[in-house]
Every structure is written in C-alpha cells, then in structure tokens.
Image (cartoon, coloured by chain):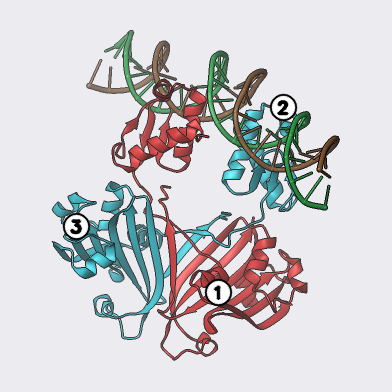
Chain colours: A cyan, B red, C green, D brown
Amino acid sequence: MSEPLHERIRAEVEARILSGDWPPGHRIPFEHEFTAQYACSRMTVSKALCELADAGLIERRRKAGSFVRRPQGQSAVIEIHDVASEVASLDRAYGYTLLSRARRRATAQDRERLALARGATVVALRCRHDADGLPFCLEDRLISLDAAPDAASESFAADPPGAWLLARIPWTSAEHRIRAERAGAAAATLGLGQPTPCLVIERRTFAGEAPVTQVILTYPGAAHELIARFSPGRD
Amino acid sequence: MSEPLHERIRAEVEARILSGDWPPGHRIPFEHEFTAQYACSRMTVSKALCELADAGLIERRRKAGSFVRRPQGQSAVIEIHDVASEVASLDRAYGYTLLSRARRRATAQDRERLALARGATVVALRCRHDADGLPFCLEDRLISLDAAPDAASESFAADPPGAWLLARIPWTSAEHRIRAERAGAAAATLGLGQPTPCLVIERRTFAGEAPVTQVILTYPGAAHELIARFSPGRD
DNA sequence: GACCTGATTATGTCTATACATTAAAACCGC
DNA sequence: GCGGTTTTAATGTATAGACATAATCAGGTC
C-alpha cells in the first residue's frame, strides 16, 4: 500500500528544496539522472518534476535543466470562507435572518455596484448572520437575474443566498475589496455603539464577463477576525 | 505552432463546464470516448482530465467516471501583496522609514507572538511605509534569528524587511489574521486623529514547524482597501 | 570583438501497451 | 426482497520508445 513512485520523487525533491539543501538557483539533477537513481522511466520522473513546476518550486528550462526558484511573488493566498461555516468553525450556533428582499429594475447605483447594463433586473437582499444569537455579520447583496434567473422565485427566507448561489451558478472570477470602516448605517442593525470599527468585505463575482452577484459583508468591530492559513504562491 | 492536444481537450471540457452546458453532477464522457473523439491515446486524455481534477472542476471516480463538481467550498483565494508593490500599483511614490530596530533575547510577549522557544533571540523592527510622502502603513515585525541568522547583520535602514526575508528564507506555511481596529498606539505614528478605524493584518510565517517571522501591518482608515482578484477554489 | 551557423541535448509531447485498483453492477442462494 | 460474492469496467500508475522543440554551446567568418 505504498504511495506512487512519482509522489515519492516529488516529496524527496521538495524536502531538499525546503530544507535549503538545494537553494534557490540551484540546478537539480537532470531527468535521466533521476531515472537512474530511482530505476524508473523518464515519464515518471517528468510527472514528479512537472508537479513541482506547477507548484512553483522549480523552473524547467529546455536544454538547461531544472532550477530551484526563489520564493518570488510577494503574494500569498488566503481563503475566505462563507459566513455560516465561519461561525461553525468558531463553535458557535449559526443563525440567519432575512431583513429585506426586493426585486427591481436596476437603479443607477445598482448598475454601478454590479457593472450591469441598463434595464437589467436584480434581486436586492439584506440579511443578518448571527452567532450564538448575537449579530455577527450584516450582508447586503445584489443578484443579477440575467445570470441567476432562478433567484426570482427564491425567497431566501430560510437559507442565506451565498450558499444558494455558489451551489448553482458557475463562476470564473471575483474581485474582493477589504477595508476597515466606521460603522455607519449598519451600526443600528448590528446593535452597536457609535464609533465601532467594522471589517468590510466587498465581493463581486463574474461568470466569464457577465456579473453574477455583488455582496457587502460588514463584520462588527475588533471582536471579529478573519483567519486564514495558507502555503506559498510563487507566481 | 498549435497548443498541445491535452491543453485543447482541457480547454474544451472546461468551456463546457463553465458555460453550464455540463452542469454540476453531470458525468462527462469516459476517457475512451475522448480518445475516439480526438483520435489520441488515453494518456493524453488522462493528462487533460487530471489537470481539470487538480483545478477542482471535476471529480474522478474509479469505475464510475468523471463528474462535474459543484462549486463547493464557499472559499476563494485572494492574494496579499507586499506593501511596496501595493503602493506601486496605486501609482504612488513609495517611501520607507525604519523607526526602530532592536536585537534581543525573546521576551515572553515575543515568544507568544512567534511561537518561539525560551532563550531564542529575535530582531524586532518597527517601520513606516509611505505613499506620496504620506503614511500608508505601519509595520511591526519580529524575526527569529534561528530561522534567519543573516538578519542579525542587516540594518534594514534602506530596504523593508518583508522583501528581504521573502527572497532568502524558504517558507511552507503562513497564517493570517485580518481585523478592523481602532487606531491605538499607532495613531500618533501614522498622524491620525483619534477614532480612525484601521485595517490590521497579522501574519505568521513558518518554514516547516519552525517560526520565521511575525508581522503586524496597520493600514489607517477607510482610505485604504486591500484589493484582490481571483478565480474559483473548489476544495 | 560581434555575428551567424549548426550540433548538441534536456525538456515537451505523445503513443501503445500493461497491469493494478476499486467501486459499481450483476449474479446467486436464501 | 436481502446479503454476500463475483464480474466488470473505469480510472491510476507505470513503461519503453518516438519525435518535436528550443536553448545552449562550440566553431567559423567577418
């Protein structure tokens, strides 16, 4: 019940790189040297090295060989979970309340929020997510009925729209804006005192070029943290 | 000069999925059906489908076939760039000032921040990043000298430590906490009035199990946004 | 030196085949 | 119908070989 050979090769090369044994810029052995070392075919070695190349750990250059990449790209990758599972992972009871629901021809403001064409129709929702009965997050969402026609006949009274959309509409790209804001109109709804800072996440989701939904999530106060674990991205 | 065949297959299947032609749950053709359609070997088809499986678009099940996955995992992936390139991408002039630098045996607080052992030594830095001459971000950083011994002989007077570290120390995982906070001690340094909300990003970076560095980045006010674009993650 | 040319060579792609693995499906006795 | 067994069909892994591609290197010319 052993792991596949190409996995073993990949892991052993990866270990050499992460330990610093093979530093950035170092030329790792050629494929034919690995085939000798592991007594396997070139395809197997190639598969292992291609995986490392995909992961960004090495760079492969024809004729020259494969080289350890320096951890370039100051960027890293984090995950943003949906609200319900976020609350669940905090071991708190999740609650959901629909505050308002409207179906309307997109206003000028709507069109700006979602990059819609004139005359498009939308569903606008406001809802509150609770944790242990206390307000946790305020959600202000716009859904394009062109992209999600089924949303017209959905009440969203019992289940939050985020999960509903994600389960139905395939999407190809999204754009996040994360900022800190003083609680404004949201303060009353969230039951806050005046000058509480809030974490605001604004997300626009597209399927190809077509806008699907835009959502503004307001998390009250320093009480809430967005926690994210991740591994390097070297693009 | 055409693209490889496995890329073409991958792209065509991907298009079918993203267009909704093959909805979540749909069983896509078997490998042997693709080999007939494209007149190629099974390995080539397999490579294309494995790429789609890695990307999370399909799920492959022995004997049963390959199925379109629903966009599960309410999660998505964002990139957090380093401060200098963030400022550059806003078309503003980047400035850097080292406020303080200390080398010391880790205090109890340091050990908690970086998950260090007793007796470890650290370099503690405070610095300010400016955009067009105005304070943009306050950085409070701790570097483990066990993980990065070279940091002891580096002044960090001219260049920010983030880029320096990332170019040298390989890392395997990191942990982010993002929250909104009222500007406290940072307010004066950033030249802020009292009740300004700040976006705070706290990051701990590890190489294997060993802690490398911890940094607290404080961005003043609603003026600043963390912008991130990304494509679906279906894990 | 600078510039072109051709040989060399590691990686990139693909084939045809083989056997392993595993879960669905078909079978069977009850 | 129900539970257990066998068959079957799909993916998973691997091989040995072939040719394509492109970057490097060595030589030769100006």
Q: What label does residue B231 carry, if any? A: none
Residue appearing at x 70%, y 61% in the figure? B168
The span from disc 1 to disc 3 (Cα, nearest Å) is 39 Å
Q: Position of residue A103 (x, y in %)?
A: 14, 61
Q: What label does residue B216 carry, if any? A: 1
What type is the residue that disc 3 sits on? Phe
Q: Are marks 3 and 2 in contact (CB under 8 Å)?
A: no
Classify residue A186 as left or right of residue B157: left
Marked residue chain, label 1: B
Kindly identify which residue carries mark 3: A156
Q: Position of residue A78 (x, y in %)?
A: 48, 59
Q: Position of residue D25 (x, y in %)?
A: 80, 40
Classify residue B129 as left or right of residue B199: right
What type is the residue that disc 2 sits on? Ala
Q: Which image quadrant for residue B127?
A: bottom right
Classify residue C19 as left or right of residue C5: left
SS state under label 2: loop
Residue in the foreground of this view, choosing between D7 and C7 = C7
Kindly identify which residue carries mark 2: A39
Q: Are marks 1 and 3 in contact (CB under 8 Å)?
A: no
Residue appearing at x 24%, y 51% in the figure? A147
Decide which of tag 3 and tag 2 comes sooner along the chain: 2
Residue in the foreground of this view, choosing between A169 and B87 = B87
Image vertical order of residue B215 relative to residue B52, above or below: below
Q: Nearer the viewer, mark 3 or mark 2?
A: 2
What type is the residue that disc 1 sits on? Ile
Q: Please check whether the numbered discs 1 and 2 fall on a single chain.
A: no
Is residue B106 in sight in this rendering? no
